[in-house]
Amino acid sequence: MEIPVEDLSFEAALRELEAIVGRLESGDEPLEDAIKLYERGDKLRLRCKERLDAAQSRIESIRTDADGRAAGTQPFAAG
């Protein structure tokens, strides 16, 4: 029984995604099974992206004053 993608941690989703990629790359899966694996893999990819985006939004950089003391935080700005 498959665990719903929404219930997986980032690490569990990534492990399952890596396993699916390996199975698809082997070329041994029948077409119908490969399609189902691809669909599950796409859901797992989106779950991992959501978890990474959520983690990134929580990362904050610490601002310091002239004496080097923490003066507050500001949202992480990627890029």
Image (cartoon, helix red, strand yellow):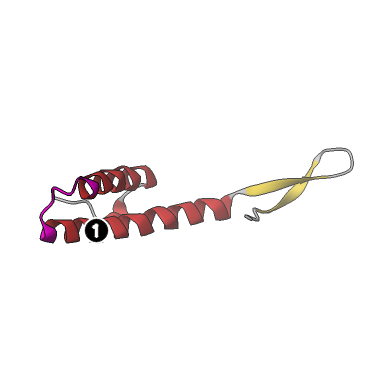
Q: How many marks?
A: 1
* Residue farthest to the top, as pictured: 68
Locate residue 55 relative to residue 69 in the image: left or right: left
Residue 9 is situated, as x and y percent measured from the top left of the image, at: 35, 47
Between 57 and 34, the residue placed more toward the observer is: 34
Identity, as a three-letter code, of the amino acid under mark 1:
Tyr
Using the image, determine if residue 21 lies above or below residue 35: above
| Residue that appears at 20% across and 46% down | 23
Residue 47 is situated, as x and y percent measured from the top left of the image, at: 37, 56
Q: Residues within 10 Å of mark 1 (few under 14, many from 20)?
A: some
Q: Is residue 30 magenta?
A: yes
Between 12 and 65, the residue placed more toward the observer is: 12
> Splitting the image into 4 quarters, where does residue 11 fall?
top left
Using the image, determine if residue 64 lies above or below residue 32: above
| Residue that appears at 10% across and 55% down | 30
Q: Is residue 64 magenta?
A: no
Query: Start and end of the magenta stretch?
Result: 25-32
> Splitting the image into 4 quarters, where does residue 68 fall?
top right
Quarter of the picture holding the C terminus: bottom right
| Residue that appears at 24% across and 58% down | 38
Residue 54 is situated, as x and y percent measured from the top left of the image, at: 50, 55
* Residue farthest to the right, as pictured: 66
- What residue is shown with label 1? 38
Residue 45 is situated, as x and y percent measured from the top left of the image, at: 35, 55
| Residue that appears at 89% across and 43% down | 66
